[in-house]
Image (cartoon, rainbow, N blue to C red):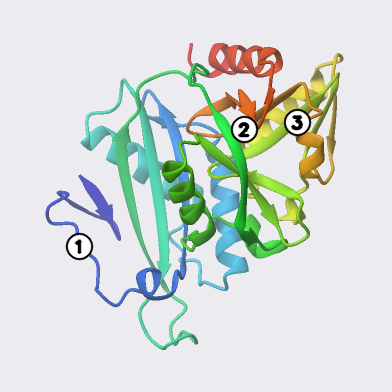
Amino acid sequence: MININGKLYSSEQATIAYNNRGTFYGDGIFETMRCFKGAPLFFEAHYFRLMAGMRILRMDIPDTFTPEFIEQSIIDLISENKLNLEHSRIRFTVWRKSGGLYSPTDNGVHYSITATALDGFFVNDVYREVELFKDHYVISGLLSTVKSSNKVVNVLAGRYALDNDYQDLFLLNENKMITECISGNIFVRTNNRVKTPPIMDGCINGIMREQVVLQLKRMLDYEIVEESITPFELQRADEIFTTNVIKGIQSIDKYRKKEFKKELATGLLESFNNTFFN
């Protein structure tokens, strides 16, 4: 079952207008959430990121979009799809109402919620070879931090990875600094120093990124800094991993001729699994 504007439909009946602005102009925003036993993880962080993104895109936020309403709508949909006892993935999508061309005539919104099953706990057992994506750049600044429905650079990077047998790609901004990977924030460890790009370099303001930064600040063995990362730093690193809320923490095994360790990522992943899935 799928929730569209507060009503439940089967997947066969769930349709939206052909001229919706999400399709026509990428005029939308979304949140993907991992849920466990019927409840979304890090819900408050997801909620505030969604609200901030809608404000940045100058959408009207409905009075009904309270934390309680959205969380309960998610819980109800998980229950309706009989995913209460499992791991599941929620996508909450918002798009501006139809009207106008590039200039919208109505700042109101429509929304949908979908729920699908996930396999289980966070794992870090998939081999990942990564390369730089140099065909197109992520533009640094506030808009790139929003999870908008306009993800053409990520889509083209994903196609390039499939065509060239890579498991992920590093994305660059217009200053040729590393921003993130196709679907996750990036962390680079050299000795006991861990770097992740600052948000304004163009990376998504990731929920799992924030959790990993907080965790590393509590670990006395490591120093965590938010600094721009050049491509040259990648081959000097001891370890590189990516984060997102669905897959958790995933190590990068190889970049060009350099192979990397997995020790910090493995320890962090074990800590998160023990904390959130017991």
Q: Residues within 10 Å of mark 2 (few under 14, many from 20)?
A: many
State the SS at label 2: strand
Residue 250: image x %, image y %?
A: 57, 26
Residue 222: image x %, image y %?
A: 84, 19
Q: Residue at x 24, y 74 (%)?
A: 18
55 or 205: nearer the eye? 205
State the SS at label 3: strand
Q: Are marks 3 and 2 in contact (CB under 8 Å)?
A: no
Q: Are marks 1 and 2 in contact (CB under 8 Å)?
A: no
Work out whether mark 1 precedes mark 2 in sequence or the reverse, and give the earlier one: 1
68 or 232: nearer the eye? 232
For the N terminus, the image quarter is top left
Q: Residues within 10 Å of mark 3 (few under 14, many from 20)?
A: many
The relative height of residue 146 versus residue 37 in the rendered view (above or below) is below
In this picture, residue 176 sits left or right of residue 183? right
Residue 244: image x %, image y %?
A: 56, 35
Q: Which residue is mark 2?
A: 242
Question: Looking at numbered disc 1 in the image, what kind of residue is underneath it?
Answer: Thr
Q: Residues within 10 Å of mark 1 (few under 14, many from 20)?
A: few
Q: CA distance from mark 3 to mark 2?
A: 9 Å
Q: Which residue is mark 3?
A: 188
Q: Residue at x 60, y 33 (%)?
A: 243
Residue lying furthest left = 12
Judge depth for marks 3 and 1 and give the one in front.
3
Work out whether mark 3 precedes mark 2 in sequence or the reverse, and give the earlier one: 3
Q: CA distance from mark 1 to mark 2?
A: 34 Å
Q: Which residue is mark 1?
A: 15
Residue 66: image x %, image y %?
A: 49, 53
